[in-house]
């Protein structure tokens, strides 16, 4: 297993799949509280815009095991349009 550790100037918050059922207020509040500039969302969200100054980024594929394109690869979400 390998990991890539990076540091950048972007503060991002991601709405989890479990959090989607609770509505969008929580994730928007967290994004505002930490001064996030990016708000990541997964398929199934009803969020259409983040707090002022936040860019909404839709992530349609999250691989959890296996190499990209590999037959046995496993995904948390995999629903790219």
Image: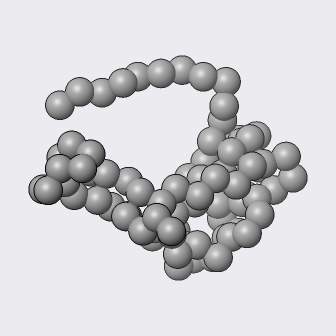
| Residue located at (17% from left, 50% from top) | 70
Quadrant into which the N terminus falls: top left
| Residue located at (29% from left, 59% from top) | 75
Task: Please identify the quarter of the rendering in which residue 7 is found.
Answer: top right
Q: Nearer the viewer, residue 35 or 70?
A: 70
| Residue located at (66% from left, 31% from top) | 10
In the image, taking residue 30 as reference, residue 42 lies left or right, namely left
Q: Examine the rendered structure and indicate whether residue 4 appears above or below residue 61.
A: above
Report the label total: 0
In the image, taking residue 76 as reference, residue 51 lies left or right, namely right
Residue 11 in the image, given as x and y percentages of width and height? 66, 35
In the image, taking residue 28 as reference, residue 4 lies left or right, namely left
Residue 46 in the image, given as x and y percentages of width and height? 64, 76
Q: Is residue 47 visible?
A: yes
Q: Nearer the viewer, residue 16 or 57?
A: 57
Q: Examine the rendered structure and indicate whether residue 62 appears above or below residue 7.
A: below
Residue 24 in the image, given as x and y percentages of width and height? 67, 70
In the image, taking residue 68 as reference, residue 32 lies left or right, namely right
| Residue located at (41% from left, 22% from top) | 5
Q: Is residue 15 visible?
A: no
Task: Please identify the quarter of the rendering in which residue 74 is found.
Answer: bottom left
Q: Nearer the viewer, residue 6 or 25?
A: 6
Residue 65 in the image, given as x and y percentages of width and height? 20, 49
């Amino acid at each position: 297993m390998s990991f890539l550790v990076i540091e950048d100037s972007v503060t991002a918050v991601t709405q989890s799949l479990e959090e989607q059922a609770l509505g969008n207020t929580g994730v928007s509040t967290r994004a505002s509280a930490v001064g996030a500039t990016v708000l990541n969302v997964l398929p199934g969200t009803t969020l259409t815009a983040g707090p002022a100054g936040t860019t909404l980024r839709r992530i349609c594929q999250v691989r959890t095991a296996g190499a990209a394109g590999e037959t046995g690869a496993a995904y948390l979400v995999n629903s790219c349009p």
